[in-house]
Amino acid sequence: MKRTLTTALLSIAAIIIGYISMALPFRLFEALSQTQMRLLLGGEILIYISIFSAYFCGKEAKAQRRVKDEKMKAQHNERIARRNEELKGIRVNNFDLAA
């Protein structure tokens, strides 16, 4: 559900940004000079790059966090297994303590 909602929001945002980026230059075509139009185009490209970077940097950070969590879980399981192996002959509830 979360993934579907995220995809829907990204699609809606892409449609809105695409519409604005296409409509804005046509509306301002006669009001702006050629240099101003180039600056507008450069600004649009910077916005696209920043959105692209933010999305994929977030995705990459999530993947790295997942790898780190898996590594920590593996280390934790290894410590538990090692502790259980050390305490293998010792039983506390049955009073069978190997000293």
Image: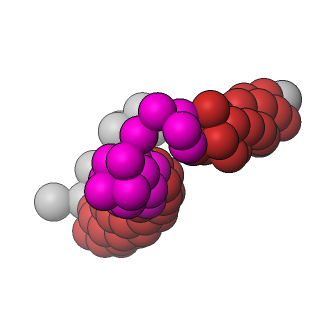
Left or right: 26 as drawn, with respect to 30: right
* Residue 54 x, y percent position in the rendering: 40, 51
Q: Is residue 15 above or below residue 1?
A: below
Answer whether residue 80 is visible to the viewer in this image: no
Left or right: 80 as drawn, with respect to 16: left
Viewer-closest of 47 and 55:
47
Who's the residue at 76% across and 32% down the image? 12
49 in the magenta segment: no
Who's the residue at 54% across and 38% down the image? 30
Q: How many marks?
A: 0
45 in the magenta segment: yes
Answer whether residue 8 is visible to the viewer in this image: yes
Color scheme of the displayed model: secondary structure
Viewer-closest of 38 and 71:
38
* Residue 91 x, y percent position in the rendering: 38, 47
Viewer-closest of 49 and 45:
45
Who's the residue at 30% across and 56% down the image? 35
Dominant secondary structure of the residues highlighted in magenta in the image: helix
Left or right: 24 as drawn, with respect to 70: right
Q: Is residue 17 above or below residue 39?
A: above
Q: Is residue 22 above or below residue 20?
A: below
The magenta region covers: 28-47
Q: Quadrant of residue 73?
A: bottom left
The quadrant in which the N terminus is found is top right
Who's the residue at 65% across and 41% down the image? 26
Q: Is residue 32 above or below residue 63?
A: above
The quadrant in which the C terminus is found is bottom left
* Residue 13 x, y percent position in the rendering: 67, 33
Viewer-closest of 54 and 99:
54
